[in-house]
Amino acid sequence: PPPVELELFLMSKCPFGVQALERIFPVAEQLGDRLKLRLDYIVSEKPEGGGFSALHGEPEVVGNKQQLCAMALAHTPGAWRRFITCQNRKWREIPSGWEPCADEAEIKRDALKACVEGVQGDALLRASMARSVAKKAHGSPTILVAGQRYQGPRTVKAFMRAVCGHSSAPPPAVCQALPPVVEVHAVVLSDKRCGKACDADRAVKALRGRFFPNLKVTTLDYGDPEGKR
């Protein structure tokens, strides 16, 4: 069966991107070739060949290149995931301390250094930037599952459910073993007299997207008998 594509657009020194990877990498490990994971980086290019700009400065530009070069040089997806996982243990120190991470991923240090400091690193980051721009990814992390923007909870089980929901038959065993999503009931008590100021749609959307995917909402008005009760 064709794999489900999960695209993650991030910044190498962004704590929220690091957190998302901590929950996505276990999903990739469990799903194997049923998941196609792509990482791209959010940067901008300076005019007249002046290099790149990143939100967290030049260290992040170098960190982005290190991770892209690791992806290009690693023999397996598991290897480059090990490299990034190693870096993320001390993500505040990126881009320093990359050498042990290269060893852990079985990537030759000299090859990685040459890639980062040479034209290959620039080319990889430029191509990655173009993909981020094409997908209108501005915030880190921006996550797409099967081409659709993901805004659900950032947990291992939630990411697994999102990918499994797009998997073709037969579903992987790990998908079949997922526990059902708990149904949560909520009552929104509002008052039509206060108009838009009491519109709870945004809050309900946030609760459903970030915490309770199977949220069932009953809306009552304070002026009605049931609302008063």
Image (cartoon, rainbow, N blue to C red):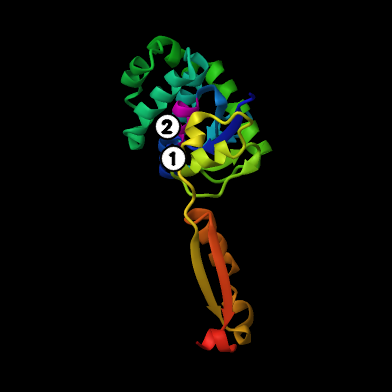
Name the image quarter holding the N terminus. Answer: top right
**Which element is circle 1 on?**
helix
Tell whether label 2 touches label 1 (CB within 8 Å).
yes
Mark 1 crowd level (few <14, some 14–19, many ≥20, 10 Å Cα): some
Residue 159's place in the image compared with 62, above or below, is below
Q: Which residues are magenta?
A: 24-31
**Which element is circle 2 on?**
helix
Q: Position of residue 69 (x, y in %)?
A: 49, 20
Residue 95 appears anywhere in the view: no
Q: Position of residue 207 (x, y in %)?
A: 50, 60
162 left or right, relative to 59 = right
Give the residue at x 39% y 23%. 82
Q: Looking at the rendering, which quadrant does residue 89 occupy?
A: top left
Q: Position of residue 107 (x, y in %)?
A: 41, 13
Of the pair 12 and 206, the residue shown nearer to us: 206
Give the residue at x 50% y 65%. 185
Residue 58's place in the image compared with 111, above or below, is below
Of the pair 201 and 97, the residue shown nearer to us: 201
Q: Residue 169: which numbered mark, if any?
A: none
Q: For marks 1 and 2, give the CA distance.
A: 7 Å
Q: Which residue is mark 2?
A: 26
Q: Position of residue 23 (x, y in %)?
A: 42, 38
Residue 74's place in the image compared with 196, above or below, is above
Question: Magenta segment: does it hold 11?
Answer: no
Mark 2 crowd level (few <14, some 14–19, many ≥20, 10 Å Cα): some
Q: Which residue is mark 1?
A: 156
Give the residue at x 55% y 46%. 139
Q: Amino acid at mark 1?
A: Val
210 left or right, relative to 45 = left
Residue 147 appears anywhere in the view: yes
